[in-house]
Amino acid sequence: MSLTKTALDARADFAQALAREAGKIALRYFRAGGATGATLKGPQDYLTQADTEVDALIRTSIEEAFPEDAVLTEETGGTGGAQIWVIDPIDGTANFARGIACFAISIAFCVDGIAEIGLVYDPVADELFSARRGGGALCNGQPITVSANASPGTAALDIGYSRRNPTADYAALVARLLEDGYDAMQFGSAARGLAYVAAGRVDGFYEAHLYGWDVLAGLLLVSEAGGSASAFPTTLWETGGAVLASNALLADQLKARLPL
């Protein structure tokens, strides 16, 4: 299946407006303390009232604007479809609930399993990262590119931690990267970490287990910003898998060091 440019343009414009509207809700809750209505889905896996309200806004808006499209979100699931929106209403909810301004709204629109539109919106910084397949990557309308850093000794990586993998594996992985000279950090939001790779603020991102709603928008951003992004097929969207993204100059080195 393919969509016309007009149909994709309409969805891209819609998604940008929707991301900003969702960001208003998230920002209102964040400024009020973030943790309103917070519960735990599992260890360190938070769900807040803001997640629920942002999810409802995004799902309802898409269903009204494009009833022919399917919707899959972290919080309310969904069913598959050839045309599908994959959403994380707040990526980095643990940060959000603690009042840490490191979270983002992630919106991807996919056709036949391929991301065509990707947006990551940071409402605190008011930065909207956006990409269209084949159209480059932008931040607030200005072109962005990955870094040109080829040296581990000056490179910074966002290395996410997943409780779905052994702690010892994560510690060993970080130790290897530090020994290679990399600076390792953890933002706690995969969507924002990938957006930062696309913008050249960090040189790479890796996490051993993430879901489609966490990464589809961000991976498109990195690819369209001239970087290297690992594949994330539909079979992994709801079961999870490893993700690696970086500038092109570090890609081969990182692929040799990090399990995918």
Image: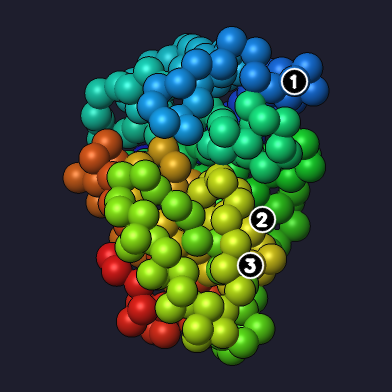
Residue 73's disc is: none
- Please state the horizontal and vertical placement of residue 228, each as a whole percent of the image: 45, 71
- Please state the horizontal and vertical placement of residue 161, each as a whole percent of the image: 45, 52
- Residue situated in front as seen by the camera: 72 or 27: 27
Quarter of the image that includes the N terminus: top left
Quarter of the image that includes the C terminus: bottom left
**Mark 3 vs mark 2: which is more N-terminal?**
2
Compared across the picture, whether 168 is left or right of 24 comes to left
The residue type indicated by label 1 comes to Gly
Q: CA distance from mark 2 to mark 1?
A: 30 Å
Numbered disc 1: secondary structure: loop
The residue type indicated by label 2 comes to Leu
Can see residue 133?
Answer: no
**Mark 3 vs mark 1: which is more N-terminal?**
1
Residue that label 2 marks: 138
Compared across the picture, whether 256 is left or right of 192 comes to left
Residue that label 1 marks: 33
The residue type indicated by label 3 comes to Val
- Please state the horizontal and vertical placement of residue 129, each as a whole percent of the image: 64, 49
Q: Are marks 2 and 1 in contact (CB under 8 Å)?
A: no
Numbered disc 2: secondary structure: strand
Compared across the picture, whether 131 is left or right of 83 comes to right
Can see residue 260?
Answer: yes
